[in-house]
Amino acid sequence: MQSFKAHLRDESHTAALGVSLARALLPGMSIHLQGDLGAGKTALTRALLHAAGHQGHVKSPTYTLAEPYRVTLDGQPVTIIHYDLYRMGSPEEFLDAGFREDFDGHNICIVEWPEKAFPVLPPPDLRVNLTVAGEGRDVELQGSSALGSSCLQRLHFPAIL
């Protein structure tokens, strides 16, 4: 299993990681974002979506549970779906909403609070764990599939961080 660790000194470094991740994404990926409230999961996703080409507002899907975004990566159109499962009461809600069908090998699915849909949530290709550390964040990315490892190999995160 391939992994990557870094300290993100502030929100600009979290945004820089989002930009780097957007350039490394591969269609069909499932990404699980883990961390406490305020750890930077939505900020990272927002930066990733903007770097992937989304021009509009990126809202947290706290109440809608899922927000799709159509972008172009490496010249190919792809849908990135951002999930926030924090308010989900049970894994069955994930199934009842039909979200499992979104994990189709084409969409990129980014899931905040993945533990809320365990065990019905498909496994991640990439796990991102954000932890508050002083004024910044510590981040660890773990590839848990060939697709996730390929993403990490493509990741070019600025050495200045």
Image: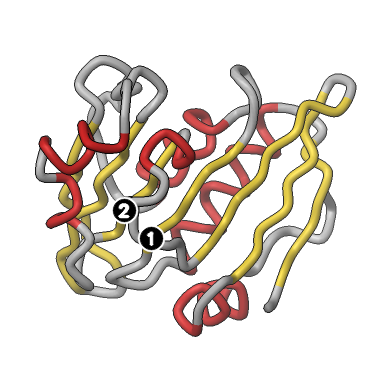
* Label 2–label 1 contact, CB within 8 A: yes
Instruction: Give the residue drawn at x 31%, y 40%.
Output: 82
In the displayed structure, does residue 5 sit left or right of residue 108? right
The picture places residue 50, in percent across and down from the top left corner, at 37, 41
- Which is more toward the observer, 97 or 156? 97
- Which is more toward the observer, 24 or 86? 86
- Residue 129 image-quadrant placement: top right
Q: Amino acid at mark 2?
A: Cys
In the displayed structure, does residue 88 sit left or right of residue 20? left
The picture places residue 31, in percent across and down from the top left corner, at 45, 55
Could you classify mark 1 by the number of other residues whose Cα lies within 10 Å: few (under 14), some (14-19), or many (20 or more)?
A: many
Q: Amino acid at mark 1?
A: Ser
- Residue 15 image-quadrant placement: top right
Q: Which residue is mark 1?
A: 30
Name above or below for residue 127 compared with residue 35: below
Q: Which residue is mark 2?
A: 109
Instruction: Give the residue drawn at x 69%, y 61%.
Output: 157
In the displayed structure, does residue 81 sit left or right of residue 84? left
The picture places residue 49, in percent across and down from the top left corner, at 36, 44
Mark 1, secondary structure of its residue = strand
Name above or below for residue 44 compared with residue 72: above
Instruction: Give the residue drawn at x 56%, y 72%.
Output: 144
The picture places residue 115, in percent across and down from the top left corner, at 48, 39
Mark 2, secondary structure of its residue = strand
Q: CA distance from mark 2 to mark 1?
A: 5 Å
Sequence-wise first label, 2 or 1: 1
Name above or below for residue 117 compared with residue 84: below
Number of the label disc, if any, that sits on residue 94: none
Instruction: Give the residue drawn at x 84%, y 53%.
Output: 160
